[in-house]
Image: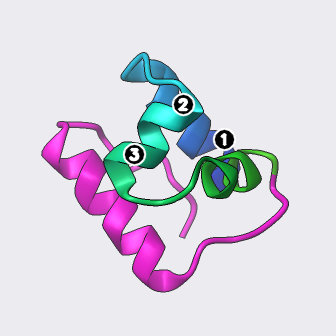
């Protein structure tokens, strides 16, 4: 699964808006929006932070492309 699709899947699973997910990750709404729309790829640090967030919320990340 592509990163953009995975971010959207996680957000929908948690029933978060893009703004709520952005707040939870301490990034801007625009950042989450760009990730979901494939306008920008996150930095390695942002990916690690997102994966840690997923782990803390018991979300399986095994279907995310490496």
Mark 2 secondary-structure assignment: helix
In the rendered structure, the answer to whether residue 43 lies left or right of residue 34 reads left
Decide which of tag 1 and tag 3 comes sooner along the chain: 1
- Front of the two marks 1 and 3: 3
Q: For the view shown, which residue lies furthest in the bottom direction?
A: 44
Magenta segment range?
38-66
Q: Residue 44's x, y, as percent?
A: 48, 83
Instruction: Answer whether residue 2 is visible to the viewer in this image.
Output: no
| Residue at position x 60%, y 47% in the image | 29
| Residue at position x 55%, y 44% in the image | 7
Q: Quadrant of residue 35?
A: bottom right
Q: For the view shown, which residue lies furthest in the top direction?
A: 15
Q: Residue 54's x, y, as percent?
A: 29, 47
Instruction: Answer whether residue 54 is visible to the viewer in this image.
Output: yes
Q: Which residue is mark 2?
A: 9
Decide: few, some or many residues near mark 1? Use Cα within 10 Å; few <14, some 14-19, many ≥20: some
Q: Which residue is mark 3?
A: 23
In the rendered structure, the answer to whether residue 47 lies left or right of residue 56 reads right
Q: Which residue is mark 1?
A: 5
Decide which of tag 3 and tag 2 comes sooner along the chain: 2
| Residue at position x 61%, y 50% in the image | 32
Q: Can residue 46 be found in the magenta stretch?
A: yes
Query: In this orientation, which residue lies closer to the viewer: 55 or 29?
Result: 29
- Circle 1/circle 2 CB separation < 8 Å: yes
- Circle 1/circle 3 CB separation < 8 Å: no
Decide: few, some or many residues near mark 3? Use Cα within 10 Å; few <14, some 14-19, many ≥20: few
Mark 1 secondary-structure assignment: helix
In the rendered structure, the answer to whether residue 34 lies left or right of residue 31 reads right
For the residues labelled 1 and 3, the Cα–Cα distance comes to: 19 Å
Q: Is residue 10 above or below residue 54?
A: above
């Amino acid at each position: 699964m592509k990163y953009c699709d995975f971010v959207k899947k996680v957000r929908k699973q948690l029933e978060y808006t893009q703004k709520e997910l952005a707040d939870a990750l301490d990034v801007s709404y625009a950042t989450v929006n760009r990730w979901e729309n494939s306008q920008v790829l996150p930095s390695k640090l942002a990916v690690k932070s997102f994966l840690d967030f997923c782990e803390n919320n018991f979300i399986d990340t095994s279907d995310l492309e490496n």
